[in-house]
Image: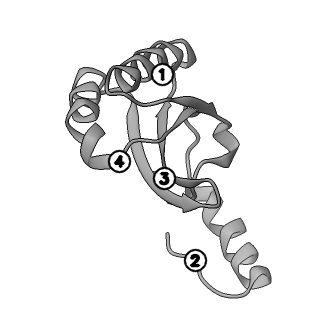
């Protein structure tokens, strides 16, 4: 579905469309922010993604008042698995010389994969 228009028009269209949507398992997110560039983390991150196919991994570079950083967001339906993968991700980032910090999943960029 593609829904455009003013908020009141969009809401009306969504009310009609949602009857056709099915619910599924709740998707959870865990995120880590890192001070390493995407070029540095790309290959190890791809290897991690290949190992855990049930988890989606997104990488979102940002430039803010604190300088450059990359938010790495893990999404999946198994919270325990997400925590294990986040732990492994943080160790991988430390091994690359970074300083990973847990980030509030509610602050995830809107363009998540």
Relative side of 15 to 109, left or right: right
Q: Nearer the viewer, mark 4 or mark 1?
A: 4
- Vertical side of 84 occupied by 47: above or below: below
Residue positioned 56% across, 18% down in the render: 79
- Vertical side of 24 occupied by 113: above or below: below
Q: Position of residue 21 (x, y in %)?
A: 56, 53
Per the image, label 4 sits on a secondary structure element best described as loop
Q: Which residue is mark 4?
A: 37
Q: Nearer the viewer, mark 4 or mark 3?
A: 4
In this view of the protein, which residue sits in the foreground, 9 or 111? 111
How far is mark 1 from mark 2, CA to CA?
35 Å
Disc on the earlier residue, 1 or 3: 1
Disc on the earlier residue, 4 or 1: 4
Residue positioned 19% across, 36% down in the render: 43
Q: Quadrant of residue 36?
A: top left
Residue positioned 61% across, 66% down in the render: 17
How far is mark 4 from mark 2, CA to CA?
35 Å
Per the image, label 3 sits on a secondary structure element best described as loop
In this view of the protein, which residue sits in the foreground, 68 or 83? 68
Report the disc number at residue 112. 3
Disc on the earlier residue, 1 or 2: 2
Q: Nearer the viewer, mark 1 or mark 3?
A: 1
How far is mark 4 from mark 3, CA to CA?
18 Å
How far is mark 4 from mark 1, CA to CA?
18 Å
Disc on the earlier residue, 4 or 3: 4
Note whether residue 77 is visible.
yes
How far is mark 2 from mark 3, CA to CA?
19 Å
Mark 1 is surrounded, within 10 Å at the Cα level, by few (under 14), some (14 to 19) or many (20 or more) other residues, namely some
Q: Nearer the viewer, mark 1 or mark 2?
A: 1
Q: Are marks 1 and 2 in contact (CB under 8 Å)?
A: no
Q: Which residue is mark 2?
A: 3
Q: Nearer the viewer, mark 2 or mark 3?
A: 3
């Amino acid at each position: 579905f593609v829904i455009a228009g003013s908020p009141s028009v969009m809401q009306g269209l969504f009310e009609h469309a949602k009857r056709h949507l099915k619910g599924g398992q709740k998707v959870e997110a865990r995120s880590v922010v890192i001070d390493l560039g995407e070029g540095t983390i790309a290959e190890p991150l791809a290897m991690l993604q290949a190992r855990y196919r049930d988890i989606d991994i997104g990488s979102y570079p940002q430039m803010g008042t604190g300088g450059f950083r990359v938010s790495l967001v893990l999404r999946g339906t198994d919270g325990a698995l997400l925590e294990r993968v986040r732990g492994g991700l943080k160790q991988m980032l430390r091994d690359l010389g970074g300083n990973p910090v847990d980030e509030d999943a509610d602050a995830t960029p809107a363009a998540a994969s």
